[in-house]
Image: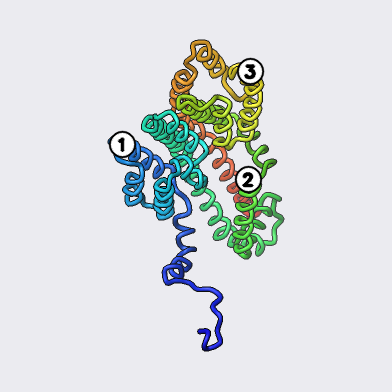
Amino acid sequence: MRKQGYILISATTKEEKQKTKNFCFDFLKFSKVGIVEKMLFTKNLQVMISSGVPLPRALNTLSDIVKTKKFKKVLLEVKKRVVKGESFSQAISKYPEIFSDLFVNMIKTGEEAGTLNETLGILANQMEKEHKIKSKIKNAMLYPTIIIVAMTGIGILMLVMVVPNLAKTFEELNMELPITTKFIIFLGTFLAQNWYIFIAIVILFVFSFSYFSKTKQGSKIIDTILLKAPVFSPLIKKTNSASIIRTLGSLIASGVPIARSIDITSKTINNFYYKKALTEITQKIRKGEKLSSAMNDYQNIFPIIVIQMIKVGEETGETSVVLLKLAEFFEQEVSATAENLSTIIEPILMLIIGGAIGFFAVSMIQPMYSILEGI
């Protein structure tokens, strides 16, 4: 190349070229590792560690089992780091998008105490309980969501296909229409002629709401509404309480100091008010207050039974045991509330749907009665 007058600036191997081509595909398809896959990984790792399998070999074996390419790649990189002398907790801390602060700190505590096997068991149980709660809530909301989507679709079809034809009839008869009928006709005509604008508005609304919900002010407003909503408020409080108590109990049981445990727990919660409360509780504990005393100012979001039971745990020296038993109680409460949620929402949905159908029917039938009276 030099003889020909060229200077080598950069070089790319065939493997790197292929990697570049597949990057977008891999990023879209394998960018997220689900809680179920992490839970199965943790359970399998516990079994292998308890059976005496060396950690690098266990990671290598599990990298062949996992389905997500990103997770497979990360496990192989973690294995290399462990072989080079890093601890397991140090190696996984380099991948916060997969291994949370909770996971890393519990593993670190387990390594220091020589109880990695037990810690992995606690972590697997923690993820399993979290997955069950989320699944219960999703299943409870599935039926109302399907009904709302179906009725919205049917309503749009009626507006687009039926209303414009009726509008032509009313126009030919040259009759004065009620304001509600005019509104329905305007809406139907607009959707029929400008459907692409409607789709653009829906997409813009979804993205705007998604962005707004991620901002501090947006999160605060949404969480305020949910905490005050009659139907959802009890479920929100029980779900957050169960998650916080389970996480806190697992961390304390693993030997993580209580102030650090609450700080880590605050990062696992999305609700603005619970996150703020936990941050303030952490500061109070670092100043010397007990957990039950620090939580006493937040009885509006934490049920009084939580504070009382934590106080009992502090007095008996069994805080972690009390927290884990309390978590089981609240998880059962969440399950029961989630199962009844569909029953509670169903009559409300029927009233809303009935009202919408009644409004549409009266708006379109009223002019027809006027025509018949004229005849």
Residue pointed to by mark 3: 289
Indicate the position of residue 244 as horizontal and vertical percent values: 53, 29
The span from disc 2 to disc 3 (Cα, nearest Å) is: 33 Å
Q: Is residue 38 visible to us here?
A: yes
Q: Is residue 171 or residue 142 the one in the foreground?
A: 142
Q: In x, y percent, where is residue 218? A: 67, 42
Q: Which residue reaches farthest left?
A: 51
* Residue drawn at the location 57% of the way across and 36% of the way down: 267
Labelled disc at residue 214? 2
Name the image quarter holding the C terminus: bottom right
**Numbered disc 3: secondary structure:** loop
Kindly identify which numbered label has been placed on residue 47: 1
Mark 1 belongs to which amino acid? Val
Among the two numbered marks 2 and 3 on one chain, the one whose residue lies closer to the N terminus: 2
Q: Which amino acid does label 2 sit on?
A: Lys
230 or 26: which is nearer to us?
26
Mark toward the start of the polypeptide (1 vs 3): 1
| Crowding near the residue tagged with mark 1, few <14, some 14–19, many ≥20 C-alpha atoms within 10 Å | some
Task: Looking at the image, tell me whether mark 2 or mark 1 is earlier in sequence order.
Answer: 1
Name the amino acid, label 3. Answer: Glu
Question: Residue drawn 47% across and 16% down?
Answer: 318
